[in-house]
Image: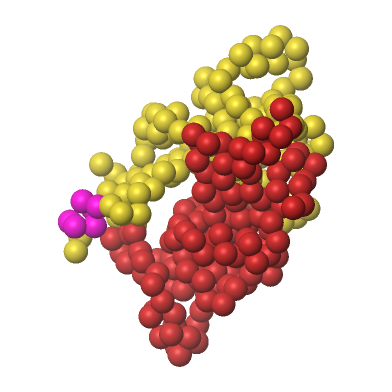
Chain colours: A yellow, B red
Amino acid sequence: MRLDANGIEVLDRDDCLALMRSVTLGRVVFTDRALPAIEPVHFVFDGDDVIISMPPGSKLASATRGAVVAFEADAFEPGSRSGWSVTVIGEARVVRVATEIERLSRLPLRSWTPRGLGYFIRIRGEYVSGRRIHPTYLEATR
Amino acid sequence: MRLDANGIEVLDRDDCLALMRSVTLGRVVFTDRALPAIEPVHFVFDGDDVIISMPPGSKLASATRGAVVAFEADAFEPGSRSGWSVTVIGEARVVRVATEIERLSRLPLRSWTPRGLGYFIRIRGEYVSGRRIHPTYLEATR
């Protein structure tokens, strides 16, 4: 097990993607008018790429076109002080090919907004990193 | 109730801060070597400012010195398709005044890392925004 300078487990790519696949909600991190922005979204995987959906005209849809974004998912249990966080960094692109839109629309991606699904955005899983913390690490270093 | 273009409730500042105060884990969003970065952290409020703690030498501690960052907290229930997300945007500064460090160290801020608490970082609650979604909104627009 690889630990970082703060004693937190550093996860390899396969573990990162497996953990991320275990949840359905993540957060896309982007820049909106030169300021950091973050928005929770449902997502699915298409291979190692993250697929999200944005209503047309949303600031996320316009801000992420071709930009490099971060996409994060995590799960923490405050009681046991354990949890993990995984971040994918890659280019975000609106999917424009009709056959690909057709295929992606069959993936189990849900919308929480009344407007429903809009554009599909693909975030390339170029750089994947993640960390995990267990109560046992804390015990071991006390 | 104010709804955005996608039919999601837009929260006022007081509601945002009240919801954020109901949780103890958030995510700081910053720029790390020109790339978007996000890191889950414990936090407490000091007035309307968010206080987080970072081990000395962590990339977050160096990347956020004087930078404008976003700090987000959220809670979602996939079953009921309800939830909220609140984001604070403001300047992040390492706390250097001894009396202030002394005071902040009495706040209920916990560390999940074996290294424990390090620098305190204050994120000014300059710009606060949040949104909330209820299943009833979805019903109403079906």
Residue nearest the viewer, comparing B18 with A74 = B18
Q: Is residue A141 left or right of residue B49?
A: left
Q: Residue at x 57, y 41 (%)?
A: B82
Q: Is residue A13 left or right of residue B17?
A: left
In the rendering, at what x and y percent does residue B106 appear? 38, 80
Residue nearest the viewer, comparing A85 with B58 = A85
Report the quarter where the N terminus of chain A lies.
Answer: top left
Q: Which residues are magenta?
A: A135-140
Q: Residue at x 29, y 44 (%)?
A: A2
Report the quarter where the C terminus of chain A lies.
Answer: bottom left
In the rendering, at what x and y percent does residue A25 appear? 53, 37
In the rendering, at what x and y percent does residue A135 appear? 25, 52
In the rendering, at what x and y percent does residue B34 appear? 63, 51
Position of B79 relative to B55 (above/below): above
How many numbered dots are placed on residues in this image? 0
Furthest residue toward bottom: B99
Position of A74 relative to B30 (above/below): above
Is residue B30 among the parts visible in the rendering? no
Magenta stretch, overall SS: helix
Q: Residue at x 58, y 17 (%)?
A: A107
Q: Is residue A119 left or right of residue A87?
A: right
Residue nearest the viewer, comparing A125 with A95 = A95
Is residue A33 among the parts visible in the rendering? yes
Q: Residue at x 46, y 73 (%)?
A: B120
**Does B49 appear in magenta?**
no
Furthest residue toward top: A99
